[in-house]
Amino acid sequence: MSIQDEDDRREYYRIDDTIALEFTPLSGAEALASDELHDSSPLFNLLSELHLLDFESQHLLRHISERDRTLANYLKVINKRIDLLGQAVAQSLLRDIGTPRRVCLSEGGVSFTSSQNLAIDSHLAIKIVLMPQALGLLLRAKVIHCQALAEQQFEIGTEFEALTDAQRQLLARHILQRQALERRQAREQPK
């Protein structure tokens, strides 16, 4: 990895987080494909699409709220109802993906432990559910390091590839919310 690559990876703020994560190694043809990944789970695809649509519609809601406060308030209530349905879908998905695990997350990638030894430069499809907003994302990533920790335990470091602008901004929003929560909790702890 060049010094420039290392500098680019370090420009993103990292957080320790607990998320549901599932990964699948991509074969040669899948790894080279530039099109979006699709999951076989219709519920996961629905959850992911709900959050992307919510993100893309935020600027429209701001414009509506400038013109018609009543309509904007009604749309916010509808949005909250949809969020509640999304959370219910996420709870169902968590049973399929597995129990949440500790990771180190940034806009640039994610590090996690695994029982699988993965080859450096191999490509993965990473399915994550960020909590508490139950944000489901299916992301393409490349393994940048795989280090043995203990018997059959490896620390896997990945770098996201080909993120859409919406995916990157959803990750950034989640990271900022987690940072704010950590700062608030630190202030509230007795000295």
Image (tube, rainbow, N blue to C red):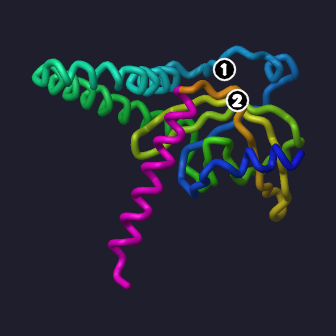
Magenta stretch in the rendered image: 166-191
Type of the residue with mark 1 = Leu
Relative to 59, say whether 127 is above or below: below
Task: Place residue 87 in its image quadrant.
Answer: top left
Residue 41 in sight = yes
Pick whichever, 79 or 20, lies toward us: 79
Relative to 137, say whether 156 is above or below: below
Tell me the SS state at disc 2: strand
Pick whichever, 23 or 13, lies toward us: 13
Local crowd size for mark 1, using a 10 Å CA cut-off: few (<14), some (14–19), many (≥20): few
Tell me the SS state at disc 1: loop
Type of the residue with mark 2 = Arg
Pick whichever, 145 or 162, lies toward us: 162
In the image, farthest residue toward the left:
70
Task: Place residue 60 in its image quadrant.
Answer: top left
- What is the tally of numbered marks visible in this picture? 2
Query: Which residue is pictured at 54% across the width and 53% down the height?
Result: 18
Local crowd size for mark 2, using a 10 Å CA cut-off: few (<14), some (14–19), many (≥20): many
How far across and how far down the image is residue 70, in percent?
10, 22
Query: Which residue is pictured at 63% across the width and 18% down the height?
Result: 38
According to the image, label 1 marks what residue? Answer: 37
Q: Is residue 180 magenta?
A: yes
How far across and how far down the image is residue 168, in percent?
57, 33
How far across and how far down the image is residue 186, in percent?
41, 71
Pick whichever, 86 or 56, lies toward us: 56
Q: Is residue 79 magenta?
A: no
What numbered label is drawn on residue 140?
2
